Image: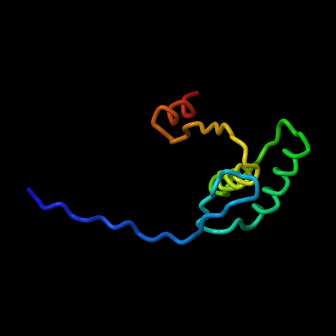
Amino acid sequence: MSEPTEVIAPVLPGTFVSFPDSPFDLYQPYSPAGDQPTAIEKLVEGINDGEVFQTLLGVTGSGKTFTMANVIARMGRPAIVFAPNKSGSPSDHDCGSKR
């Protein structure tokens, strides 16, 4: 039997940020960049204006989840996040390949 080894987690870059009147602390491994600051601002503005439905569009890997985490933290309100499983399982592949 081998001896247990100590696992040391790497120190990750980034910081925790908090927002006024929000109970949430958000870990930001990096600051919002590109279109994210504008998207965050417009989504928060829409919520404050009473918008019930808003849509955040973006390609895979564009930072939509990070953008929404920032919106939720800034608003300080609970949120339900629907995250469909799009893992690319074999059954998903078969659905699109049959004619």
Query: Which of the colour schemes (rainbow, by chain, secondary structure, one colour) is used?
Result: rainbow
Residue found 82% across the figure and 61% down from its top: 38
Instruction: Depth check: give the residue in front, 83 or 88.
Output: 83
Residue found 88% across the figure and 39% down from its top: 51
Please state the total of marks drawn on the protein image: 0
Residue at the outermost right position: 49
Q: Quadrant of residue 34?
A: bottom right
Residue at the outermost top position: 99
Residue found 72% across the figure and 48% down from its top: 76
**Image spot of residue 45 (x, y percent):** 87, 51
**Image spot of residue 12 (x, y percent):** 49, 69
Please identify the quadrant where the C terminus is shown. top right
Instruction: Depth check: give the residue in front, 41 or 22.
Output: 22
Q: Is residue 74 left or right of residue 42?
A: left
| Vertical relation: 52 (above or below) 9 | above
Q: Is residue 50 left or right of residue 65?
A: right
Please identify the quadrant where the N terminus is shown. bottom left
**Image spot of residue 20 (x, y percent):** 76, 58
**Image spot of residue 55 (x, y percent):** 79, 43
Q: Is residue 46 left or right of residue 10?
A: right
